[in-house]
Image (cartoon, rainbow, N blue to C red):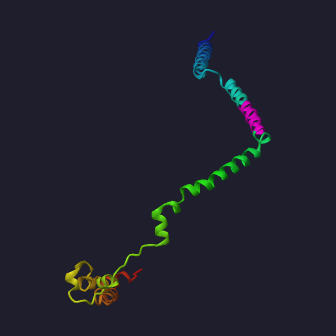
Amino acid sequence: MSTASSIRKFVKDQQRGSLAELKDLSRENLREIRNIYSNIADLTGIPTEKAVENYIASASQYFEDALGRGREDVYGFEPRGISESASVMKGMIDPALDQYSLMNRDGFMSQALNPSVVEIDPSKIFGSLDYSTKGYSTANPLLDYRDAASQAMIQGRRGAIEQQADFYANNPNVKGLMTYNV
């Protein structure tokens, strides 16, 4: 036998041995993975297939019970009981209104028959609103808007609009923004 063929035989033997060892390791790893999945599945108490069966069974039982109760409520409905209790309640409302009515109270009835009127002096109100009165600003300075600062806020600064328009029309920086050099 030549050395080349003996090397080939040695390599093939090594390959077969390595393959057999890899297959054994794969089987062992698969067994361990299945054990892990089995342990995880057992943590919930029951397998998933069994849990789904239980859920379906309990849901169908609930719907059967609910349907039975609903039919009983619909077909066993007695409107006479409602109308009888309503007429009893209606009979109680009128005496309650008579007993607790505000018309039975002396203060309410006297006010309703003879309402009290409050007299006011309109000149006191309108006098406080008269801005032409001399000395008004000293009487109530918080309501006096005749000073220069208040008037400037009310009317605005004179010439402000014209000044702003002049700025935008004649300022070289603004004109530079409007010049397009391509």
Q: How many marks?
A: 0
Residue 74 point in image, percent of width and height: 77, 42
Per the image, is 115 magenta? no
Considering every residue shown, the one lying at the far top of the view is 1
Q: Is residue 86 above or below residue 12?
A: below
Image quadrant for the N terminus? Answer: top right
User: Which of the two residues, 89 or 182, is positioned nearer the viewer here?
Assistant: 89
- Whether residue 53 sits left or right of residue 169 in the image: it is right
Q: Is residue 57 above or below residue 8?
A: below
Residue 20 point in image, percent of width and height: 62, 14
User: Which of the two residues, 70 or 169, is positioned nearer the viewer here?
Assistant: 70
Residue 30 point in image, percent of width and height: 61, 19
Query: Residue visible at 45% across and 72% down?
Result: 115
Considering every residue shown, the one lying at the far right of the view is 75
- Whether residue 128 sits left or right of residue 47 in the image: it is left
User: Which of the two residues, 17 or 47, is positioned nearer the viewer here?
Assistant: 47
Place residue 73 in its image quadrant. top right
Query: Residue visible at 49% across and 66% down?
Result: 109
Image quadrant for the C terminus? Answer: bottom left
User: Which of the two residues, 158 or 137, is positioned nearer the viewer here?
Assistant: 137
Residue 121 point in image, percent of width and height: 33, 82
- Whether residue 117 sits left or right of residue 35 in the image: it is left
The magenta region covers: 59-72
Q: Is residue 90 above or below residue 58?
A: below
Per the image, is 63 magenta? yes
Place residue 100 in its image quadrant. bottom right
Magenta segment's dominant SS is helix
Q: Is residue 134 above or below residue 96?
A: below
Query: Residue visible at 53% across and 63% down?
Result: 103
